[in-house]
Image (cartoon, grey):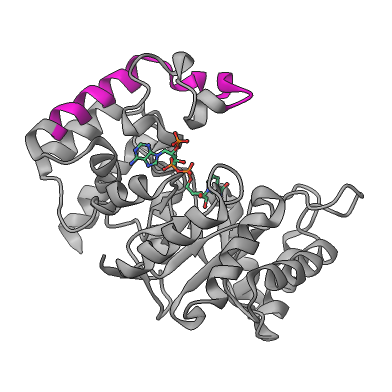
Amino acid sequence: MNVKKFGKTGVLVSELCLGTMTFGWQTNEDAAFKIMTSFNEEKGNFIDTANVYSSGHSEQIVGKWLAANNREEMFVATKVRFRTAEHPNGVGLSRKHILYSIRQSLQRLNTDYIDLLQVHAWDPLTPLEETFRTLNTIVEDGLVRYIGVSNFRAWQFEKALQICRANGWNEPVSLQPNYNLLTRAVEFELLPMAHADEIAVLPWSPLAGGILSGKYRNGIMNAPKGTRIGDSSAPENYSRFDNERTERVLSVLEKISQETGKSIPQISLNWLLCNRDITSPIIGVRTIDQLEDNLGSTGWSLNETQIRELNNASELAVTYPYDQRAEDQQTRDRIL
Ligand SMILES: NC(=O)c1ccc[n+]([C@@H]2O[C@H](COP(=O)([O-])OP(=O)(O)OC[C@H]3O[C@@H](n4cnc5c(N)ncnc54)[C@H](OP(=O)(O)O)[C@@H]3O)[C@@H](O)[C@H]2O)c1
């Protein structure tokens, strides 16, 4: 694996980040250890978790592994925002909840600092000033190296950025959005914003929860047991992907798989790796075999025709004012 510059910072991270949402859920501690070790042996240094994954168990597993390995070599990201306790303040981005959560995360991760603390999502109740002043204090206190944001809209991210700049606070340097061949709306506002502000972009669910591995060709609603959708208590949450566009994308993936000899997950991930606005897709795996398959997405590139075919098959309808984008891009390419 190669390394990428982490947005405008001086840090270098592996071009794939290892997501740990399955740890302590579908992946037990033993398997998770093997997955982290193998990822690290392939030069992966970037791990993403969250305070709420498996009710904190994911952070614990990562922490146990870090204690037995070279913690300093790794770039460890976690998150805060969602509910950690049933009382009214056990959720959100208030100073109270963030300071509680960071202590818990540090303890579970077995470390005295976190490389990247990400706001997991927007909190409609807490003023941005309260959240980002608190995050700045945590960085100043040495508990966190960088601040990031997940699931914000572009105006929310920009507002946070401007508040930090106006106050001389440490500003968010990364964005973690849902982005893959089936979920491309981030291309309208968030990616151009990240490009302009040199923000690191870390796509989550790069295989759309497994759909872009091609394993649900018999219909998402007929998902077999032993898969994320087949085991889900609410498979209907994925029914929005049960459509002609998904079929079209999977057909093109299959065709390119035959042309290149690469697996369908590798091609889906490589489509993200070929995008220069992307820093590191966050891969999710249940097994070591899936990890090995997904690591094979690096070290080669789709050609321009293949990228165009995938773009066309997955294209979203573009309406005003986003239809200006192509024109802006042409102007930029001409002048810069
Ligand atoms: N910020 C956020 O709100 C947010 C939300 C979600 C996730 N995330 C982060 O993003 C990470 C990745 O998300 P994700 O797990 O949804 O990613 P994903 O890549 O879209 O889906 C991963 C799932 O696809 C299946 N899979 C993966 N590789 C495969 C392969 N080579 N062949 C066949 N099946 C394969 C596995 O599911 P099965 O084997 O069970 O079918 C695996 O658990 C998470 O771990 C987390 O760190 C963040």
Q: In the rendering, at what x and y percent does residue 288 appear? A: 38, 50
Q: Is residue 78 above or below residue 134?
A: above
Residue at 37% across / 22% down in the picture? 216
- Depth check, front residue: 145 or 58: 58
Q: Is residue 334 left or right of residue 235?
A: left
Q: In the rendering, at what x and y percent does residue 323 appear? A: 34, 35
- Depth check, front residue: 130 or 329: 130
Residue at 48% across / 29% down in the picture? 226
Q: Quadrant of the C terminus?
A: bottom left
Q: In the rendering, at what x and y percent does residue 20 appear? A: 52, 54
Residue 13 location, quadrant? bottom left
Residue lying at the far right in this picture: please name it.
87
Q: Is residue 162 left or right of residue 259?
A: right
Could one spot residue 81 in this view of the protein? no
Residue at 49% across / 23% down in the picture? 225
Q: Is residue 182 above or below residue 324?
A: above
Could one spot residue 41 in this view of the protein? yes
Residue 6 location, quadrant? bottom left
Residue at 17% across / 31% down in the picture? 309
Q: In the rendering, at what x and y percent does residue 219 appear? A: 40, 14
- Depth check, front residue: 100 or 37: 37
Q: Quadrant of the N terminus?
A: bottom left
Q: Which residues are magenta?
A: 232-257
Q: How many marks?
A: 0
Q: Main secondary structure of the magenta part?
A: helix
